[in-house]
Image: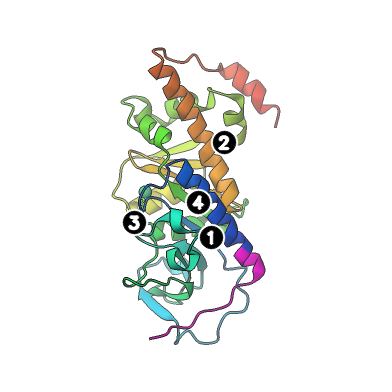
């Protein structure tokens, strides 16, 4: 069966191109080993010319929150290598529209798969719930990024810092002024939960309404941004704090860190 595909506006293709460029950096960082990580963009406001009928588009059943009906998302595919995005974006990702009842989605673009049926990311439910929360947030973020940054993950294994959100933020923020400045709402800590689960999705969306980055304990990080570059920046800067903290520990000393007074002074630069 040859399923129909929509044509994407140049402005949408440009957003997708940014995703491909960032994916190359994620691969160099070793944050997306094998099929690790996933990315989505909320295109609902950008896809203005939608087909009258979806009958000739591939349909995938799913269980989506009622509020997500009609949402149009670019999302990477389950089991796909994000490092392949720039070479074959239509094979690695798709544009999906959630149907009126929230019982599934139509694949409007991409999702080509020679070996079998393409499925959106195993973390699709988390992406949908984050986009739902961001729809009403003041920042209007439309990009969601999940990756496996080794230093933040390593810190989540720390027997004290990995269990205490306040200590985790203090450790990262106090390493360098820019971390306090550019991750101002800090890192939210979510205890280990089954990847792809609804519980993980709910906890993540709740935390991302308060924080710039969410650290999934012993798994990875999630951030949002107005575009994919901004989402990457939040995780990159937060991870730098974790990297310096761990570098100090591996040099044999516990880092002193900036004092609270010094950090408060830094915040006045904003
Ligand atoms: O494979 O990273 O969390 C994608 C993931 C699952
Ligand atoms: Zn993951």
Looking at mark 1, is its residue's CB closer than 8 Å to ligand 1? no
Marks 3 and 2, the one that precedes in the sequence: 2
Q: Point out the frontmost of discs 3 and 2.
A: 2
Is residue 239 located in the magenta-colored stretch of the structure? Answer: no
Residue 42 vs 243, above or below: the answer is below
Real-space CA distance between mark 3 and mark 1, rounded to the nearest whole angstrom: 20 Å
Which of discs 3 and 1 lies nearer the camera? The answer is 1
Q: Earlier in the sequence, mark 1 or mark 2?
A: 1
Residue labelled with disc 3: 198
Regarding mark 4 in the picture, which secondary structure is present there? helix
User: The C terminus appears in which quarter of the rendering?
Assistant: top right
| Residue identifier under label 1 | 41
Pointer 2 local density, CA inside 10 Å: few below 14, some 14–19, many at least 20? many
Residue found 44% across the figure and 18% down from its top: 248
Residue 211 appears in the figure: no
Q: Is residue 117 above or below residue 236?
A: below
**2 vs 4, front mark:** 4
What residue would you read off at disc 4?
A: 23
Q: Nearer the viewer, residue 140 or 59?
A: 59
Looking at marks 2 and 4 on the same chain, the residue that comes earlier in the sequence is marked by: 4
On residue 243, which mark appears? Answer: none
- Residue 170, horizontal then vertical, whole percent: 49, 25
Q: Residue at x 53, y 60 (%)?
A: 41
Q: CA distance from mark 2 to mark 4?
A: 21 Å
* Distance between the alpha carbons at the discs numbered 1 and 4: 14 Å
Mark 3–mark 4 Cα distance, whole angstroms, equals: 26 Å
- Say if mark 1 contacts mark 4, CB within 8 Å: no
Task: From the image, tell me which residue sits under label 2.
Answer: 183
Which contiguous range is marked in magenta?
1-13
Q: Residue at 64% across / 72% down in the picture? A: 9
Instruction: Estimate the spatial distance between the alpha carbons at disc 1 and disc 2, rounded to whole Å.
Output: 21 Å
């Amino acid at each position: 069966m040859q399923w129909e595909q929509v044509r994407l506006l140049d402005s949408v293709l440009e957003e997708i191109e940014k995703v491909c460029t960032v994916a190359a950096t994620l691969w160099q960082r070793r944050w997306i080993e094998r099929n690790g990580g996933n990315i989505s963009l909320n295109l609902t406001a950008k896809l203005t010319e939608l087909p009258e009928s979806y009958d000739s588009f591939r349909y995938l059943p799913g269980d989506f929150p009622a509020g997500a009906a009609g949402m149009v998302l670019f999302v990477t595919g389950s089991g796909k290598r994000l490092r392949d995005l720039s070479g074959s974006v239509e094979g690695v990702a798709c544009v999906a529209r959630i149907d009126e009842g929230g019982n599934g989605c139509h694949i409007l673009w991409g999702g080509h798969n020679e070996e079998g049926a393409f499925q959106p990311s195993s973390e699709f439910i988390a992406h949908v719930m984050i986009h739902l929360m961001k729809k009403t947030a003041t920042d209007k973020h439309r990009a969601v990024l999940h990756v496996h940054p080794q230093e933040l993950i390593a810190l989540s294994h720390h027997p004290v810092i990995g269990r205490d959100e306040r200590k985790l933020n203090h450790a990262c923020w106090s390493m360098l002024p820019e971390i306090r400045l550019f991750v101002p709402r800090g890192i939210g800590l979510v205890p280990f939960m089954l990847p792809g689960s609804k519980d993980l999705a709910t906890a993540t969306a709740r935390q991302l309404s308060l924080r710039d980055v969410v650290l999934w304990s012993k798994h990875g990080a999630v951030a949002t941004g107005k575009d994919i570059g901004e989402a990457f920046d939040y995780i990159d800067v937060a991870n730098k704090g974790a990297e310096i903290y761990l570098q100090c520990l591996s040099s044999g000393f516990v880092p002193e860190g900036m004092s609270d007074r010094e950090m408060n002074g830094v915040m006045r630069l904003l």
